[in-house]
Amino acid sequence: MGRKRAERGARRALVRALIFGLAALLAAAVASIGWLAIVYPKRAGPGRGREVRVEVRPDLDVDELAARLAAAGAIEDPWVFALHARLMRADHRLREGEVLLTDDMTPGDVLMRVAVGYGDATVRVVVPEGFHRFAIAARLERWGITDAASFLAATEDRALLDELGVSAPSAEGYLHPDTYRLTASLGAEGIVRRMVANHRRRAAPLFEEHASAMRELEATLSWGPHEVLVLASIIEKEAVVADERPIIARVFLNRLRVPGFSPRRLQADPTVSYGCLAARDAAPSCAGFSGTITRSMLSDRENVYNTYRHEGLPPGPISNPGLASIRAVLDHEPNRYLYFVARGQGRHAFSETLEEHNAAVARWRRR
């Protein structure tokens, strides 16, 4: 009798052990699935924002795609990514063609980019200092955030500009250069709002810090913050090395303020180029413009941005300047220069007189 009780007890203990073992396995499986579905897709990517391109061919299965993504540096542990894709039933919904990624994307965002119907991926978009709105539009379209035409239309939307307190014809100059994390659901107007808000937040302390300089510019040139942005946008395109920004700023200000300097033309090549983008149809010389400035463009008065033919500032900013270029206008280096010419390696030769300038031009052309 005792032996039977012992055998029954052993069987019950074995059953309990099996039940506990199966429960533990089930719990582990549920935890693994939960981690794969919820935690894994939110993990940070392996890199720091490097651009990655991956070709998705129709004959690729999810394992081969995961291997490609890993080889390109977009993900780690390709077998885990493949499991995640299968769990999300994305293995039969892969896109075809080249996919643009960054190596700091989460696995979830990578899946949204390589498969169809899995949501709105967050994309890290870098807007460098000196990019104009046309370049920004092209970059946003390339990343699939919004099409270029919609973004450009939003930058000119009068109702939106009034809402944002931008009295200029477009948001050019107010689209602050920075690194943005964007989704397609923001829409073109939402992106413009974010960029302009970023400009207000970042530039306001700079204008407050240089309140006395603003008073001087208002007294001598009737300038406000907008005009400072216009000149800063030109400096952003003209200056290559940082320490020349305040010198170039003063050259342009000298041209606008020094008695006897006439006509008061800035003669900045980037303004001509921008005019051919912003007002191509109005300027005959801009027909077929591909980025190279010609003599006919320099002499074309129909290009309203052409500072070789029109005095003073152009109608608006020609790029979106960084804080350093705005600061250069507000804290420019005192000098008496009126001219400058490129002398190589991003630097310029500065002159006070036209005779000195012509000699410098001849010297650097010979070299």
Image: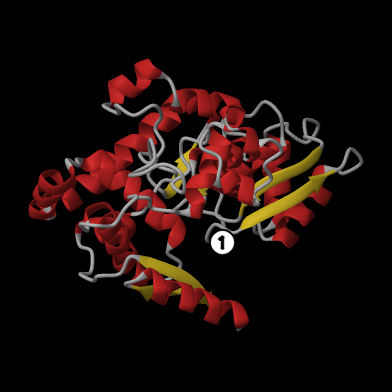
Instruction: Please report the residue visible at 55 percent of the width from the left and 48 percent of the height from the top.
Output: 298
Which residue lies under the disc numbered 1?
Answer: 47
Instruction: Please report the residue visible at 46 percent of the width from the left and 39 percent of the height from the top.
Output: 305
Q: Residue furthest right?
A: 59
Q: Nearer the viewer, residue 76 or 127?
A: 127
Does residue 228 sit above or below 94 in this rendering?
A: below
Q: Is residue 270 left or right of residue 89?
A: left
Q: Is residue 361 left or right of residue 257?
A: right
Q: Nearer the viewer, residue 348 or 205?
A: 348
Please provide percent x and percent y for residue 322: 36, 54
Q: Nearer the viewer, residue 132 or 13?
A: 132
Whether residue 115 can be seen here = yes
Total count of labels: 1
Q: Secondary structure at mark 1?
A: loop
**Scheme of colours in the image:** secondary structure
Instruction: Please report the residue visible at 56 percent of the width from the left and 44 percent of the height from the top.
Output: 41
Q: Is residue 35 left or right of residue 216?
A: right
Q: Quadrant of residue 241?
A: bottom left
Could you tell me which quadrant the N terminus lies in?
top right
Q: Amino acid at mark 1?
A: Gly
How many other residues sit within 10 Å of disc 1, few (<14), some (14-19) or many (≥20)?
some
Please provide percent x and percent y for residue 20: 56, 44
Q: Is residue 117 left or right of residue 201?
A: right
Please provide percent x and percent y for residue 171: 39, 32
Does residue 158 sit above or below 26 in this rendering?
A: above
Could you tell me which quadrant the C terminus lies in?
bottom right
Whether residue 27 can be seen here = no
Instruction: Please report the residue visible at 36 percent of the width from the left and 44 percent of the height from the top.
Output: 311
Please provide percent x and percent y for residue 310: 41, 41
Q: Nearer the viewer, residue 88 or 320?
A: 320
